[in-house]
Amino acid sequence: MLADANGNRYTPSFTVKKNRKYRYYVSQLAIKNPDLKFTGPLRLPAREIENLVTERLASFLRSDGEVFDRLGGSTDRPGDLRQLVAAAKNFVEGWPSVRSNEFKDLLQCFVRRVIIHEDDVQVLISRASLQQVLEKGDTFVPHYVLNAPDKSGHPDDLICDSRKMERI
């Protein structure tokens, strides 16, 4: 899911120093062409990128205005929209109780791509898939959505959320 602005993907990797494991993402372009002059980041610390994406998703889902603006166009009924906004908040509140591997699978249900730029990170979210996850109700069961069909074929389906980042 992680790529640079030119579409070059990153691969998860790790190193061990003094019996401590450090996870990071390394550019596939740098792996395949080690002699190439590369302008973007070659390696990204995994925890920092993952936390940035998760924090931004949580902020988006907790914001009535953002959920209304970005997901509200799909329904004209105020009651449905109120339920969607409430479901988004309940969804985020359930995150701490989800195991990390299930959480990763759950995010993959609606996050299509994370694009790393020099000074910001863009998260591309499938509107239809996110709505499907939220419409499952306040019962937070990741395996429900893992079998959900991908409805994100239409370009209007993608929500692009940007976040400025500190130099990592």
Image (cartoon, grey):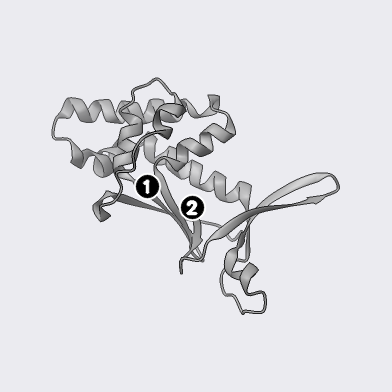
Any mark on residue 157, and which?
A: none
Image coordinates of residue 163 in percent, x first then y, are 45, 53
Q: Choose top left, top right, bottom left or bottom right for residue 138.
A: top left
Work out whether mark 1 precedes mark 2 in sequence or the reverse, and give the earlier one. Answer: 2
CA distance for labels 1 and 2: 11 Å
Q: Number of marks in the image?
A: 2
Give the position of the C terminus as an image quadrant: bottom right
Task: Decide: is 40 above or below 150.
Answer: below
Image coordinates of residue 59 in percent, x first then y, are 42, 40
Any mark on residue 1, and which?
A: 2
Query: What's the residue at 18%, 25% (across, down)?
Result: 79
Residue sticking out furthest to the left:
76
- Residue under numbered circle 1: 125
Task: Decide: is 127 above or below 120.
Answer: above
Q: Amino acid at mark 2?
A: Met
Q: Amino acid at mark 1?
A: Ile
Q: What element does badge 2 sit on?
A: loop
Crowd around label 2: few <14 · some 14–19 · many ≥20 (10 Å): few
Q: Nearer the viewer, residue 163 or 9?
A: 9
Q: What element does badge 1 sit on?
A: strand
Residue sticking out furthest to the top:
139
Query: What's the residue at 84%, 44% (across, down)?
Result: 19
Query: What's the residue at 14%, 30% (across, down)?
Result: 77
